[in-house]
Amino acid sequence: MMVTDEGQISVDFLLGISIFLLTFGFVIQFIPSLFISTSAGGSLNPVAYRTANILADDPGWWQNKTNAQNGTDWEMHLNDISRIGLATDATPSTRQTRTPKMLNKTKILQVLKLNKTMLTSKLGLYNKISGSQVDYGYNITLEKNGSPMIINGSIISFGETPPTSQDIYKITRQVLVETGNIASFRADEVTTGSSSDKVIVNISGPQSEDVIIQIIDINITNPNSSFDNATLNGSLNIPSDYSVYKRTNTSDFIYSTTPIPLENSTDALRLIFNHTLFPINTTYQLELNFTRMNFIQIWPPYIEYTSKIEPLYEPATLIVEVWK
């Protein structure tokens, strides 16, 4: 009998075709999921992640096609917003910022003025399903020490209250938030009056924001030195008129009550004065009274608050929550 190998299939061919069919079957099942939005029926983590990144790292953008103008200062062009971002940008004509995660106060406050439809659209918090727009629920909050931040009397939180019976997709970002202005002085550059225990600062009114004065590099030469109080055409009251915070080499600024002991050169004071103390167009002389201090800059002229003013940035947490 003749033996022939016609009609036989090699083992290598069988192995190869089996691997191909298994791989093909896997691809047929897996590939469609790459083209389906995760927002349609799955996790909204990508939506929350994208929103948090845009708000923290992007200054936003506006564009008016009629007059061919645009920029990142969308907060000044609310009718022409293309994209909402909160990052500070010193050059509105560019699309990028050199200071990501440093959030601009004016942008933050302007967001609070936008209605829900505008926010949903410009932040992309929706999905298109069968040609219809389905909006996501969301809450975006800036928190400090576990509580929503308050800037210029406004609670920085917008959106809806997160539900308790639905899955919530949450992303957080650590940011620096512009909360106001601050004038920081070294102890050897502040001006004193008739007594070396007294600092006098000129403040031009009116002031629309709280006045924040910081004194650093305090040269302690006498034991039992302290900050006692502040006066402005008479006595001021804590905390209705002003509040005082002290920083040491072991702690950040902590609210303190007077008299406040000053024990070494690493101590610093931050005083926050209610802006309503400076209501009219005049120059106010604010007196800061100490015990057993020796400030060396003799008047006149007294140092000006505006001579050292700059934006104050405070650490905070940006929280983005999204749900269906």
Image (cartoon, rainbow, N blue to C red):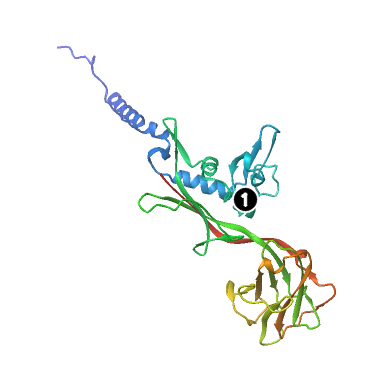
In the image, residue 126 sits, relative to residue 308, either above or below, namely above
**Would you say residue 156 is visible in this rendering?**
yes
Label 1 sits on a secondary structure element that is helix
Placement of the C terminus among the 4 image quadrants:
top left
Residue 191 % position (x, y): 79, 75
At 59% from the left and 61% from the top, the residue drawn is 153
Left or right of 45? Residue 122 is: right
Residue 95 % position (x, y): 65, 42
In the image, residue 59 sits, relative to residue 129, either above or below, namely below
At 67% from the left and 77% from the top, the residue drawn is 236
Q: Name the residue under label 1.
A: 107
At 54% from the left and 44% from the top, the residue drawn is 119
Residue 54 % position (x, y): 56, 46
Residue placed furthest toward the bottom: 223
**Would you say residue 211 is visible in this rendering?**
no
Which picture quadrant has residue 230?
bottom right
Residue 167 % position (x, y): 37, 49
Residue placed furthest toward the front: 280
In the image, residue 128 sits, relative to residue 318, either above or below, namely above
Left or right of 12? Residue 42 is: right
Q: Which amino acid does label 1 sit on?
A: Lys
Local packing at callout 1 (Cα closer than 10 Å; few below 14, some 14-19, many 20+) is many
In the image, residue 278 sits, relative to residue 45, either above or below, namely below
Residue placed furthest toward the left: 1
Placement of the N terminus among the 4 image quadrants:
top left
At 67% from the left and 82% from the top, the residue drawn is 228
Residue placed furthest toward the right: 300
Q: Which is more toward the observer, 241 or 92?
A: 241
